């Protein structure tokens, strides 16, 4: 199944007394480039959020934005509470730094007080485990919706790629059929040329056969055709399989390009040259389209 790298999804839910919304936008990118924008209440969850996204998306430029609505308490009436999980995490890291560097300095209150988001409004503490669980469920909903959109776009992309690959294969079949005819035509032209040069004297059939055999060996593209057929089989297996990876397909198209160029360099036949041009055009389309596949 093909997945496009482009997509958009949004999910919303009421968690506690507040409305949470998650927007995910995905664009083409060679690797996984993840940008996460969170309200301060959710900053401690960023590492886990990144881990969850990376588990379901292999590459693409991902922009994830989370918003929380429904803060009715005025700034002056807010009471602050301690973000204890964040504090404990910082203390563990400070102790690790001391142990690694052999430092003797104690962890001071002034150092801890400078930690961002250490103090949060009391209304935001609540049942943190419940909020976290419901938020992760909402994140899963958003990523599933994004996945469905990417699969729909990927299906359309796959159909277009198959059309190009079918035309590419048709050209290859015509080239394979053309091979024997090329030698017959070469033999006829060579015999006529030698006859003209010899003022009508009969051509030495043995010598003529040797020249044709040399030409056949020099211009033989049987191996290239077989390798291209093998690569095409791999392409159709990948694109119709459970997981079509863009990187694998891109590498496969590079190999196809090398074989087509070899055919072009070996053959001076005009009909084959025209077929090769069509194959290169379709291959260029495929290589452009594969950049959209995750």
Image (tube, helix red, strand yellow):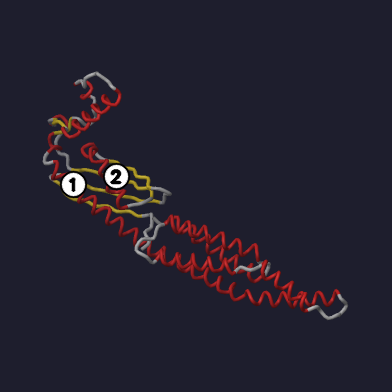
**Image quarter of residue 81:** top left
Query: Residue 244: horizontal and vertical position, in percent?
Result: 39, 60
**Does residue 152 appear to the left or right of 90 in the view shown?**
right
Q: Mark on residue 127?
A: none
Is disc 1 surrounded by few (<14), some (14 to 19) or many (20+) residues within 10 Å? Answer: some
* Viewer-closest of 278 and 41: 278
Query: Residue 30: horizontal and vertical position, in percent?
Result: 43, 49
The residue furthest right is: 199
Query: Residue 3: horizontal and vertical position, in percent?
Result: 36, 59
**Does residue 3 appear to the left or right of 69 in the view shown?**
right
Instruction: Residue at 35% x, 55% y: name it.
Output: 7
The residue furthest top is: 105
Q: Quadrant of the N terminus?
A: bottom left
Question: In terms of sequence position, does the residue under pointer 2 or pointer 1 come before the other?
Answer: 1
- Tell us which disc is closer to us: 2 or 1: 2
* Viewer-closest of 72 and 32: 32
Q: Mark on residue 19?
A: 1
**Disc 1 on helix, strand or loop?**
strand
* Viewer-closest of 62 and 13: 62
Q: Residue under circle 2?
A: 50
Figure check: 159 above or below 112: below
Instruction: Residue at 28% x, 57% y: name it.
Output: 145
Q: Quadrant of the C terminus?
A: bottom left
Figure check: 223 above or below 140: below
Query: Residue 172: horizontal and vertical position, in percent?
Result: 56, 70
Distance in Å between CA atoms under marks 2 and 1: 22 Å
């Amino acid at each position: 199944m093909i997945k496009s790298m482009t997509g958009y999804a949004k999910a919303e839910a009421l968690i506690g007394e507040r409305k949470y919304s998650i927007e995910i936008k995905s664009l083409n990118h060679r690797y996984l480039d993840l940008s996460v924008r969170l309200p301060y209440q959710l900053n401690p969850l960023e590492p886990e959020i990144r881990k969850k996204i990376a588990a379901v998306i292999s590459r693409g430029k991902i922009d994830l934005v989370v918003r929380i609505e429904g803060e009715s308490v005025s700034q002056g009436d807010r009471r602050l509470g301690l973000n204890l999980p964040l504090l404990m995490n910082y203390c563990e890291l400070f102790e690790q730094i001391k142990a690694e560097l052999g430092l003797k300095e104690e962890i001071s209150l002034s150092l801890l007080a400078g930690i961002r988001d250490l103090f949060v409004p009391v209304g935001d503490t609540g049942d943190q485990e419940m909020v976290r669980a419901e938020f992760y469920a909402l994140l899963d909903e958003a990523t599933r919706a994004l996945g469905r959109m990417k699969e729909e776009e990927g299906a359309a992309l796959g159909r277009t790629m198959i059309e190009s690959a079918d035309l590419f294969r048709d050209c290859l079949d015509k080239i394979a059929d053309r091979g024997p005819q090329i030698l017959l035509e070469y033999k006829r032209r060579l015999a006529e040329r030698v006859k003209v040069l010899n003022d009508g004297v009969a051509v030495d059939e043995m010598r003529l056969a040797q020249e044709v055999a040399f030409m056949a060996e020099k211009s033989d593209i049987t191996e290239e055709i077989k390798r291209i057929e093998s690569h095409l089989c791999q392409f159709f297996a990948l694109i119709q399989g459970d997981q079509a990876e863009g990187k694998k397909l891109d590498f496969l198209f590079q190999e196809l390009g090398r074989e087509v160029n070899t055919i072009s360099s070996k053959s001076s036949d005009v009909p084959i040259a025209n077929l090769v041009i069509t194959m290169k055009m379709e291959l260029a389309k495929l290589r452009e389209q594969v950049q959209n596949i995750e």
